Image (cartoon, grey):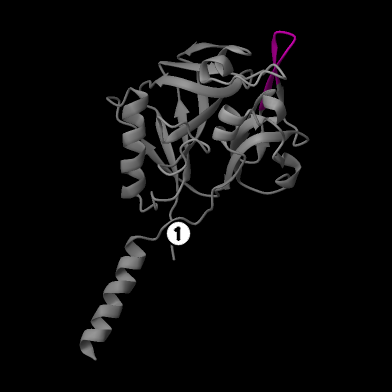
Amino acid sequence: MIKAICGLLILMLCSSLFAGNNFEVKYKGALKNIMHKGDISAKYSLSEIAGKENIYALGALENLQGEIQIFDSKPFNSAGINEKIEISNSYSKKASLLVYAQVSEWTEINIPNEILSYEQLETYIAEKAEENRLDVDKPFPFLLEGKPESIDWHIIKWEIGDNDHSHQKHIESGPHGTLEKTEMDILGFYSSRHHAIFTHHTTNMHLHFKTADEKIAGHLDGMKLGQNMVLKLPKPNKK
């Protein structure tokens, strides 16, 4: 009897130590269907998440005519129109690809200044997620804040009817470039189990951004981190 009680107490303690995730990452569409089948049709209407609190989302607009970024339920959808970048705060758009979650509380972590490369960041995020009792076998969102040393970015503007997809063609199809030492917010989703779904096959991360002045937002292709940047991870389940 005593052994049974002790076993139960240990199980309860372990459950509290490894609380897990109190959010669910959802997605619509798949990168592999875009890249290999040329399927760029709408898979989801953003109006279905309009009015919900604490939404964080990224993806591509219908027919790959722009990028989706939603930070704390405010859209910053971007498109290249007449050689200019236009930002829309509307939920009236549809998505060819979307990944999203609802997160109400975040844990702030100061990123060590020696973490500089995209690859170092990917490893660091996984380590910190485990330390903060997130279930890293499931996808999770994260935020980055600060001034990266530089980022490479693009806003897709695909030519309708072109079924020959590549990442490089996506980058070059619309506005793209490099930003240096620019204050910004970055939204990412991490998963080791969704390659070719919402992360590319060479990485566990998919990142989008918006600048602090809200003039540019889009897909982040590469990054060198800056000094004193902050990582935010969802707070784990307290139960």
Q: Position of residue 88 (x, y in %)?
A: 73, 26
Identify the image quadrant of the N terminus: bottom left
Q: Nearer the viewer, residue 82 or 200?
A: 200
Residue at the (39%, 50%) spot, across then down: 137
Q: Position of residue 151 (x, y in %)?
A: 46, 17
Q: Position of residue 227 (x, y in %)?
A: 35, 22
Q: Is residue 212 visible?
A: no
Q: Nearer the viewer, residue 150 or 119?
A: 119
Per the picture, the main secondary structure of the magenta-coloured stretch is strand
Identify the image quadrant of the C terminus: bottom left
Residue farthest along the right direction in this orientation: 92
The vertical placement of 108 against 35, above or below, is below
Residue farthest along the top direction in this orientation: 83
Q: Residue type at mark 1?
A: Asn
In this rendering, position of residue 186 left or right of residue 227 = right
Residue at the (48%, 21%) spot, across then down: 221
Disc 1 secondary structure class: loop
In this rendering, position of residue 80 left or right of residue 227 = right
Q: Quadrant of residue 215?
A: top right
Magenta region: which residues? 77-86
The residue identified by callout 1 is 237
Confirm whether the magenta stretch covers residue 146.
no
Residue at the (48%, 16%) spot, across then down: 152
Q: Quadrant of residue 230?
A: top left
Answer few, some or many: residues within 10 Å of disc 1's Cα (few below 14, many 20 plus, some between 14 and 19): some
Residue at the (69%, 49%) spot, across then down: 52
Q: Is residue 5 visible?
A: yes
Residue farthest along the bottom direction in this orientation: 1
Q: Position of residue 171 (x, y in %)?
A: 55, 16
In this rendering, position of residue 52 left or right of residue 206 = right
